[in-house]
Amino acid sequence: MSSTIKLEIVTPAGKKYSGEIEYLRVPAMDGEIGILPGHTPLVTGLKIGLLEIKKGTERLVIPISEGFIEVTPGNINVVVRTAELPEEIDVERARRAKERAEKRLNGLNGEEVGLEYIDYVRARAALERALARLKAAETNGR
Ligand code: ATP
């Protein structure tokens, strides 16, 4: 069995990443999944969080928002709404987004009725995206 597997990460803006990797960890709908070469075929949804790529001593952490992953014996395809490479992450922008989302959440109580709940879900998602970007920026900088 090959010791690497080809990974492609695609967003609406185009191809974000393409390369042979040794290990991938993704935030799947029902929990984190680790994928090694030879993983059984799989299609599942992805949620906002951090995707981690390992190859040799290299480790790359990429913040993603919603999407899906398809694993076949020789390939992994990740299709997500957003993903930023380390050099693309604007830390100040993520900090501002985090503050905005926190302010909005403080003014809402998250009750499961009416328009307020939709605002709550949106603000939670915005906060999760900002936190993932900040965490990735911090982790890759190490
Ligand atoms: P903001 O409120 O700052 O726009 P957001 O979470 O609402 O943040 P998204 O809708 O997830 O933004 O993304 C819109 C586009 O902007 C995507 O192309 C995404 O990659 C990019 N983007 C968002 N935040 C950042 C950031 N902090 N650094 C770099 N690119 C970002």
Image (cartoon, rainbow, N blue to C red):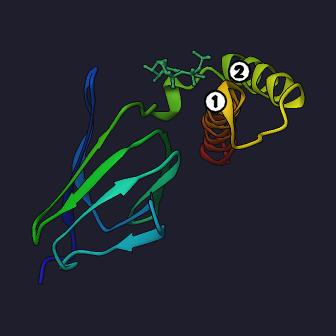
Q: Judge from the rendering whether residue 126 lies leftward or rightward of residue 20; answer left or right.
A: right
Instruction: Give residue 108's quadrant in the image.
Output: top right
Q: Horizontal placement of 109 versus 80: left or right?
A: right
Question: Residue 36: x and y, percent?
Answer: 30, 75
Mark 1 is surrounded, within 10 Å at the Cα level, by few (under 14), some (14 to 19) or many (20 or more) other residues, namely many
Residue pushed farthest front?
113
Placement of 33 over or under 119, stated as above or below: below
Q: Which mark is residue 126?
A: 1
In the displayed structure image, the side of residue 44 where residue 46 appears, left or right: right
- Decide if ligand 1 comes within 8 Å of the CB at mark 2: yes
Which residue is at the far bottom?
1
How far across and down, in percent of the image, does residue 27 sit?
Answer: 48, 58
Front residue of this view, candidates 42 and 138: 42
Question: Which x, y percent locates residue 86?
Answer: 51, 34
- Circle 2: element type: helix
Tell me the residue that label 2 is attached to: 97
Q: Nearer the viewer, residue 87 or 81?
A: 81
Amino acid at circle 2: Ala
Sooner in the amino-acid sequence: mark 2 or mark 1: 2
Asked which quadrant contains residue 89, the reply is top right
Q: Residue at the location (62% across, 42% down)?
A: 132
Q: Is the CB–ligand 1 distance for label 1 below 8 Å?
A: yes
Residue type at mark 1 is: Ala
The percent coordinates of residue 52 (x first, y second) are 47, 56
Label 1 element class = helix
Q: Nearer the viewer, mark 2 or mark 1?
A: 1
Are dots 2 and 1 in contact, CB under 8 Å? yes
Q: Residue at x 38, y 66 (%)?
A: 56
46 versus 94 height, above or below = below
Q: Nearer the viewer, residue 105 or 116?
A: 116
